[in-house]
Amino acid sequence: MKNRATLHKLSVFLIVILIFIFASFCLLSCNKETQKEYIDYTKNNEFEVEHTTYVANPDAEESEQYGMEIYCPKDNNPKYGLIFYVGTVIPADKYTYLSSALAKAGFLVIIPNVSFNMTYGYYEDQTEVISKKVLKDYSDVQFFVGGHSQGGGAAMRFSTDNQSKILGAIFLSPLCYPDLDTDDAKYGLSNSNLPALLLEAQGDCVLNASQKSDAEERMPQNVERHMIDPGAHMSFSEWEDDATLSFFYGDGLGITEEGKALQKTKTIEYIYGFIYKVIGIEK
């Protein structure tokens, strides 16, 4: 009788152990199935690009609406992304060469849409609001911040205030508006270790020497810097018709179409190299 009772207890114990093992296996299997699989950046990815538009205030007048353009690798989960700010009055679609190339390689690219495409002028009310929303809504993505011209100034402001939340900063001929910053409220990374990339154009006719010097002074000491030649300020975008270039002091009028295309190719290559270096992948 005693042996039978002992055998019964042992059987119950074994059953409990088996149930625990089975439950643990099911839980691990469930977690494995639901765990997000990120893109493998060691591969030369060629994803289809999905483009969507988000409006933060759809009930407002069209001229007062703001939001973002989103470019992402379709049906894939990017681990890294770029928030990119446009240059003065330049529409987001004039940077498709860059946003599409990065999304195709597996990066999430978000371009804030602000009133009149003035990313620095509407920084506090719109640019910063959208940028913080991006970091919150895409909390599983690690972001770089970048910008061109006036957008470079916006990128400098946002990266200065949010260094711990981003991986690095990318500047394409940045305009940081020194005249608008007081000495005790000057945005900059000169005392920062944040990785940064500065791309300049040899034939830049938009920024003067003082503005270029000011931007350089705001860069971290270990900034990676490249001068693109031939290159023009406006050729970091695709807004390059003669009428536009004439308005911007004739910037880029003396550069061939092949030279402008080469500038864009080099821009993408330098940005790729910088991003992969920061995330620790050799290409």
Image (cartoon, helix red, strand yellow):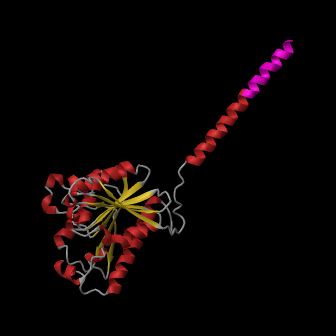
Q: Is residue 8 magenta?
A: yes
Vertical comparison of 10 with 127: above or below: above
The secondary structure making up most of the magenta span is: helix
Vertical comparison of 224 with 20: above or below: below
Q: Position of residue 173 (x, y in %)?
A: 26, 70
Vertical comparison of 128 with 26: above or below: below
Is residue 272 toward the left or the right of residue 209 in the image?
A: right
Q: Position of residue 91 (x, y in %)?
A: 27, 69
Q: Position of residue 128 (x, y in %)?
A: 26, 53
- The image shows a total of numbered marks equal to 0
**Residue found at x 53% / y 69%:** 44
**Residue found at x 65% / y 36%:** 24
Between 96 and 223, the one nearer to me in the picture: 96
Is residue 75 toward the left or the right of residue 112 in the image?
A: right
Vertical comparison of 120 with 241: above or below: above
Tell me if residue 116 can be seen: yes
Please give the range of residues in magenta.
1-15
